[in-house]
């Protein structure tokens, strides 16, 4: 089974020549939006997976599908693109790119981007959508960044 690398949320993704990808407007795991509900005109998700040498030689690692789950529980499932970006001879990393026009986020809360391989859940990426003017959460967050005195 392929190994999960990462998931990136942004406003636009463009595959480029030479096994490169251009990302624009990258979001963090907390998406600050102007208000709730909101519609983001352009929303894209890129997910990368590493194939074993055997999977790369076979030309793939099963049938991928993804699901976007909303905080209240309903979900939309999508098949992964038939031809993922970044494919070619000797390429052991595959990237799936999903683009949404006028993506609605109807409520504040935790959203989940689930990936299935051959019908089995292989990864869950969680992100939180909240208005930019919302009060700071009451729970402590881990320290992020480089701290030489720790």
Image (tube, rainbow, N blue to C red):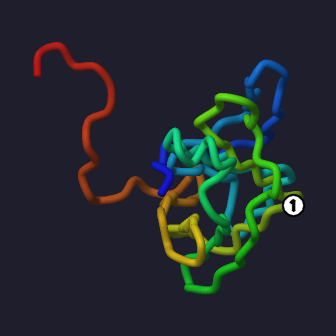
Structural crowding at the residue carrying mark 1, measured as other residues with C-alpha within 10 Å and reported as few (<14), some (14–19) or many (≥20) = few
| Residue at the extreme left of the image, as rendered | 150
Give above or below for 138 relative to 116.
above
Q: Tell me the residue that label 1 is attached to.
A: 102
Nearest the viewer among 100 and 36 is 100
Give above or below for 77 relative to 19.
below
| Residue at the extreme top of the image, as rendered | 148
User: Horizontal and vertical percent for residue 101?
Assistant: 88, 58
Nearest the viewer among 60 and 37 is 60
Q: Secondary structure at mark 1?
A: strand
Is 126 placed left or right of 115 in the picture?
A: left
Number of callouts: 1
User: Horizontal and vertical percent for residue 26?
Assistant: 65, 36
Q: Residue at x 53, y 45 (%)?
A: 54
Is 134 placed left or right of 17 in the picture?
A: left
Give above or below for 27 relative to 102.
above
User: Horizontal and vertical percent for residue 127?
Assistant: 51, 58
Q: Residue at x 55, y 68 (%)?
A: 114
Q: Residue at x 73, y 35 (%)?
A: 86
Nearest the viewer among 55 and 22 is 55
- Location of residue 18 by image quarter: top right
User: Horizontal and vertical percent for residue 24?
Assistant: 75, 32
Q: Residue at x 11, y 16 (%)?
A: 149
Nearest the viewer among 21 and 133 is 21
Is 13 placed left or right of 62 in the picture?
A: right
Is 51 placed left or right of 3 in the picture?
A: right
Q: Quadrant of the C terminus?
A: top left
């Amino acid at each position: 089974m392929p190994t999960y690398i990462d998931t990136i949320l942004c406003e636009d993704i463009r595959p480029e020549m030479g096994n490169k990808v251009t990302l624009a407007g990258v979001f963090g795991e907390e998406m600050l939006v102007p208000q709730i509900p909101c519609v983001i005109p352009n929303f894209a998700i890129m997910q990368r997976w590493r194939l074993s040498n055997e999977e790369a030689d076979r030309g793939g690692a099963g049938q991928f599908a993804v699901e976007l789950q909303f905080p209240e529980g309903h979900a939309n499932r999508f098949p992964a693109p038939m031809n993922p970006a970044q494919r070619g001879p000797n390429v052991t990393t595959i990237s799936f790119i999903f683009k949404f026009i006028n993506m609605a986020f109807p409520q504040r809360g935790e959203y989940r981007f689930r990936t299935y391989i051959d019908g089995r859940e292989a990864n869950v990426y969680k992100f939180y959508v909240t208005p930019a003017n919302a009060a700071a959460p009451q729970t402590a967050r881990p320290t992020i960044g480089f701290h030489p005195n720790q």
